[in-house]
Amino acid sequence: TQLALCHYSTSMDEENFLRPGEFRPDRWIRKDASDRVDNFGSIPFGYGIRSCIGRRIAELEMHLALTQLLQKFHIEVSPQTADVRAKTHGLLCPGAPINLRFVDRN
């Protein structure tokens, strides 16, 4: 029997995340040891013995790439971009292109 988890529904559940529809990156920053997010609220790499073996390297690569981009560029959403609506096709993706402007910080 194959079982698939809908990450979108767990990520949009108020029991897992306060105000899930809002863009709030600070939700991932812990203020102290007692401030914890639900470990099962988001499990994009799976869990247990069958979890993704490349998780740590993927996370490190994402942090490195984002850090370098944010150090070098100011990133803005282009005025040409319409309101972003999500759609799901097994994965959550934007319903239309999201145009960004990368402005050199130098």
Image (cartoon, rainbow, N blue to C red):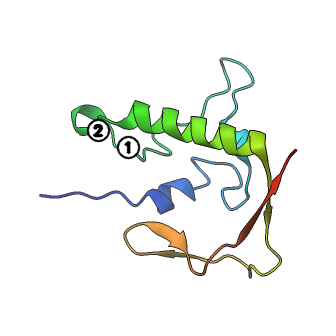
- Residue 84 marker: none
Looking at the image, the residue that sits furthest to the left is 1
Q: In this picture, is 75 found above or below 100?
A: above
Amino acid carrying label 2: it is Ser
Tag 1: Cα neighbours inside 10 Å, few (<14), some, or many (≥20)?
A: some
Q: Which comes sooner in the sequence, label 1 or label 2?
A: 1
Rendered-image quadrant of the N terminus: bottom left
Q: Quadrant of residue 31?
A: top right
Task: Please tell me which residue is depicted at 28% across the width and 33% down the height of the picture.
Answer: 48
Disc 1 and disc 2 in contact, CB within 8 angstroms = yes
Question: Dot 2 lies on which element?
Answer: loop
Looking at the image, the residue that sits furthest to the top is 33
38 on left or right of 23: left
Q: In this picture, is 44 found above or below 31?
A: below
* Picture coordinates of residue 26, whole percent (x, y): 74, 40
C-alpha separation, residue under disc 1 versus residue under disc 2: 6 Å
Residue 38 seen in this snapshot: yes
Question: Dot 1 lies on which element?
Answer: loop
Q: Quadrant of residue 76?
A: bottom right
Looking at the image, the residue that sits furthest to the right is 106
Q: Which residue is mark 2?
A: 51
Amino acid carrying label 1: it is Phe
Task: Please tell me which residue is depicted at 88% across the width and 44% down the height of the picture.
Answer: 106
Q: Which residue is mark 1?
A: 45
Task: Please tell me which residue is depicted at 40% across the width and 61% down the height of the picture.
Answer: 6
